[in-house]
């Protein structure tokens, strides 16, 4: 609890410092409000448009949650398949390597063209962005089983399935955490890009509308809400990481 309290205090101090620095830049440079509104104006816009922001935030959060879940599940399944099957590695790994060379964000307009402006195109974009880092990080760790554990598995006569589930998967859990860290960073970016390309709802759509109407404070307010959502996901992944380290060290 003391460690959690210290982290909360450090986070609060860093937040207050960022707000103070933001206000200092606005006050000292005299930058126009339509370019960089001060923290007070953004807070006022957040309060005045709370219902509108909340409605769009729920839409974006729903897309993000479903996209992350699908991408993570498919990423874990693919990593396990590649570990268990040499044929799958021979067939799928070159495709995965080639696919990662194409920026997924560049495919957002194509996905929107194929699937429309609704929720499915956003979920697919987020799932693709999540899928590749989870698959790559977990597979690399699954294949990096220490020599001693691999020899012990062979001496015990464990099959590929038992070795993967009982030895490789627990050992590879830090790789999964690494993939999740990347996923929760790229996921909100995919939300924005998907909604910028084409959407009638969401925080990205709200930012576009606010920018077009010169409501810069509202645009910053929507961005802050999205950043808060991303930070919340990051905190959850970090908590999962610490919990897994404690469980594995005590096992």
Image: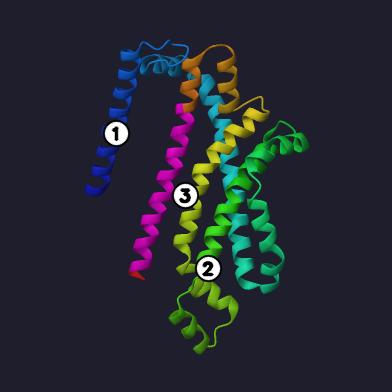
Q: Which residue is mark 1?
A: 14
Which residue does the numbered mark 3 point to in the structure image? 181
How far across and down, in percent of the image, does residue 142 sit?
52, 68
Q: Residues within 10 Å of mark 1 (few under 14, many from 20)?
A: few
Badge 1 marks a residue whose secondary structure is helix
Q: Which of the marked residues, 2 or 3, is nearer the chain's N terminus?
A: 2
User: Dot 3, how many residues are within 10 Å of its Cα: few (below 14), some (14-19), or many (20+)?
Assistant: many
- Is residue 235 found inside the magenta-colored segment of the image? yes
Residue 57: x, y in percent? 53, 29
Magenta span of residues: 224-249
Residue annotated with mark 2: 142
Which residue occupies 32% across, 13% down? Answer: 27
Residue 82 seen by the camera: yes
Tell me if label 1 and label 3 are in contact, CB under 8 Å: no
Secondary structure of the residue carrying tag 2 is helix
Observer-nearest of 235 and 100: 100
**64 over 219 or under it: above or below:** below
Give the image quarter of residue 42. Answer: top left
Residue 133 point in image, percent of width and height: 55, 53
Q: Quadrant of the C terminus?
A: bottom left
């Amino acid at each position: 609890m003391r460690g959690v309290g210290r982290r909360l205090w450090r986070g609060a101090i860093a937040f207050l410092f960022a707000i103070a620095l933001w206000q200092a830049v606005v006050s000292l440079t005299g930058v126009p409000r339509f370019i960089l509104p001060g923290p007070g104006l953004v807070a006022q816009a957040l309060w005045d448009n709370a219902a509108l922001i909340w409605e769009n935030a729920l839409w974006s959060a729903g897309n993000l949650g479903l996209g992350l879940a699908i991408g993570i599940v498919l990423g874990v399944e693919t990593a396990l398949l590649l570990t268990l099957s040499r044929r799958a590695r021979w067939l799928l790994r070159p495709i995965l390597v080639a696919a990662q060379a194409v920026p997924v964000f560049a495919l957002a307009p194509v996905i929107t063209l194929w699937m429309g402006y609704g929720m499915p195109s956003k979920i697919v974009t987020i799932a693709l962005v999540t899928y590749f880092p989870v698959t790559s990080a977990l597979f690399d760790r699954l294949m990096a089983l220490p020599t001693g554990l691999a020899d012990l598995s062979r001496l015990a006569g464990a099959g590929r399935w038992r070795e993967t589930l009982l030895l490789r998967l627990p050992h590879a859990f830090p790789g999964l955490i690494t993939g999740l860290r990347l996923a929760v960073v790229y996921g909100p970016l995919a939300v924005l890009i998907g909604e910028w390309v084409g959407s009638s709802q969401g925080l990205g759509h709200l930012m576009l509308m606010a920018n077009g109407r010169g409501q810069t404070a509202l645009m910053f307010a929507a961005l802050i809400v999205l950043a808060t959502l991303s930070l919340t996901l990051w905190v959850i992944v970090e908590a999962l990481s610490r919990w897994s380290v404690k469980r594995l060290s005590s096992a």
